[in-house]
Image (cartoon, rainbow, N blue to C red):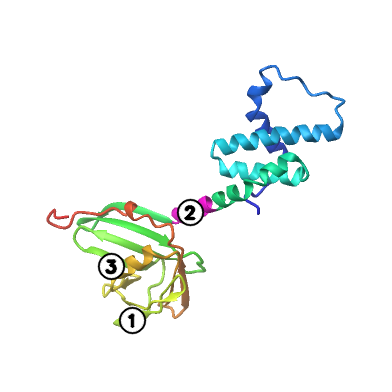
Amino acid sequence: MTVAPLRSRYAFAALAGTLILAGCSQGAPAPDAAQPPAQAQADEASRNLDAYRKLLSMHNDQMAASMGEDIVQRFPNSAAAKEVQQTLPDVEKRWKEASEKARLTALWQYQVAPMEGGTQSTAAIYDSQPTDVHVRLVLRRHTSWGQSAFLFSDTHGFICKGDCTVAAKFDDKLHPIKAYAPPTGEPALMIRDDKGFIALLQKSKKISLPVTMQDGKKVDLLYEVGGFVPDQWQALPKKGGKK
């Protein structure tokens, strides 16, 4: 498994040197210039293993996974590689899960701002496979208008006469939803049952929404919603000061 785009033995050597610098400064003997290659490799593997152990103690899974892979690849038959292989799979798994969680979380944008005589709190995410059409999925709370969920296009509106049905899929499970185009002409598609939609969203990793744009183009919008953090979508007081 590859967890970092580059593998530089010089970078790892520098890291290992940094982590064992304290040991070197305490009077450790200098390496023998005439040291046999096999012994030199064994010593390097040992130093890198010390660095790997240090990274584990620091809970730095990203660098530990990179260092561990380097040890296994460069010193495959060493005692250091044998020790690393006992923990490396779990380290790599943790790092992969953490990096994917961070990626999904970063897809969402949260904002609180004035909006037409009131205040709105939004949580918004762009479609994950845009072409020439970029459409945001927006969850909104407004002090006067209440809660809503809708699609908003940066360019074209949507074709939806009266109530239309969107063949939505939540984690590939079909769950059609009712929607309508706002009569005021904004390039949006409003979801009728916002509460039900948001409840399904919070249980899902991805949502697929096939829609038809105003120019007749059919697009299948995909939203990777697994990083949604409800607490970051701020609740607002309702009109009149009631919660």
- In the depicted view, which residue is nearer to us: 208 or 97? 97
| Type of the residue with mark 2 | Lys
Label 1 residue SS: strand
Give the farthest residue toward the left: 240
Label 2 residue SS: helix
Evaluate whether residue 191 shows in this view. Answer: yes
Name the disc covering residue 214, or none. none
Q: Disc 1, disc 2: CB below 8 Å?
A: no
Please give left or right for residue 174 compared with residue 181 in the image: right
Label 3 residue SS: helix
| Type of the residue with mark 1 | Cys
Q: Residues within 10 Å of mark 1 (few under 14, many from 20)?
A: some
Please give left or right for residue 193 compared with residue 90 in the image: left
CA separation in Å, label 1 and label 2: 34 Å
Q: Quadrant of residue 201?
A: bottom left
Q: Is residue 119 magenta?
A: no
Q: Disc 3, disc 1: CB below 8 Å?
A: no
Note whether 167 is above or below 30 in the view shown: below
- In this rendering, which labeled residue sits more in front, label 1 or label 2? 2
Instruction: Find the magenta span and give its range.
Output: 97-107
Q: Residues within 10 Å of mark 2 (few under 14, many from 20)?
A: few
Residue beneath the point at 39% across and 57% down: 228
Residue beneath the point at 31% across and 66% down: 149
| Type of the residue with mark 3 | Lys
Residue highlighted by disc 2: 101
Give the farthest residue toward the top: 27
Place of residue 20 in the rendered image (x, y in percent of width and height, measured from the top left): 65, 27
